[in-house]
Image: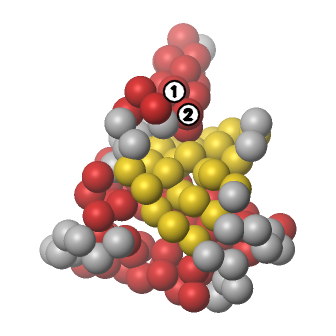
């Protein structure tokens, strides 16, 4: 199983696949929750682009995003609804199983990397 860690902040989002972490800036005005979803979307787009066929587990410390994607929480925001639908479209286009799991912040490898990245960016 390929485990992909995802995280978002108020300025950036990222995902970590194997030992590679990809960082992207948030679009102007994006909320923290939107950033969490953008990380998941970017990770799934990479899975599609690379033609990965093994089972995938998307891991995030965003209880909201993971619970919404797993149909546990309702989606009240139109922006999050659109992003969640994008996640579901990407998953529907894959032949391999995709699961979504929540982990505490300290266990989210992408969160650790993003925290370091944001600290380095502030130093410049």
Farthest residue to the right: give it: 50
Q: Which mark is residue 4?
A: none
Q: Residue at horizontal 48%, vertical 36%?
A: 108
User: Can I make out residue 59 in this image?
Assistant: yes
Identify the residue shown where x is 35% and y is 36%: 104
Residue located farthest toward the front when viewing the structure as drawn = 1
Q: Residue furthest top?
A: 123
Q: CA distance from mark 1 to mark 2?
A: 5 Å
Q: Secondary structure at mark 1?
A: helix
Q: Tell whether label 2 touches label 1 (CB within 8 Å).
A: yes
* Quadrant showing the N terminus: bottom right
Q: Quadrant of residue 30?
A: bottom left
- Image quadrant in which the C terminus is located: top right
Mark carried by residue 112? 1
Q: Is residue 52 above or below residue 109?
A: below
Where does residue 55 sit, x and y in percent of width and height?
68, 68
Q: Which residue is mark 2?
A: 109
Residue nearer the viewer, 86 or 66: 66
- Name the spot of residue 23 as percent of width and height, x first: 63, 42
Q: Is residue 39 left or right of residue 81?
A: right
Give the class, few, some or many, for how many residues have Cα within 10 Å of label 2's Cα (few <14, many ≥20).
Answer: many
**Residue 79: in sight, yes or no?**
no
């Amino acid at each position: 199983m390929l485990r992909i860690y995802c995280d978002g902040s108020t300025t950036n989002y990222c995902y970590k696949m194997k030992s590679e972490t990809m960082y992207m800036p948030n679009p102007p005005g994006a909320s923290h929750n939107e950033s969490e979803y953008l990380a998941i979307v970017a990770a799934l787009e990479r899975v599609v682009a690379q033609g990965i066929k093994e089972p995938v587990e998307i891991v995030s410390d965003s209880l909201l995003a993971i619970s919404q994607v797993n149909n546990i929480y309702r989606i009240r925001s139109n922006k999050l609804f659109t992003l969640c639908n994008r996640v579901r479209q990407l998953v529907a286009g894959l032949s391999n199983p995709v699961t979504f799991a929540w982990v505490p912040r300290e266990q989210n490898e992408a969160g650790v990397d993003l925290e370091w990245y944001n600290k380095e960016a502030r130093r410049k």
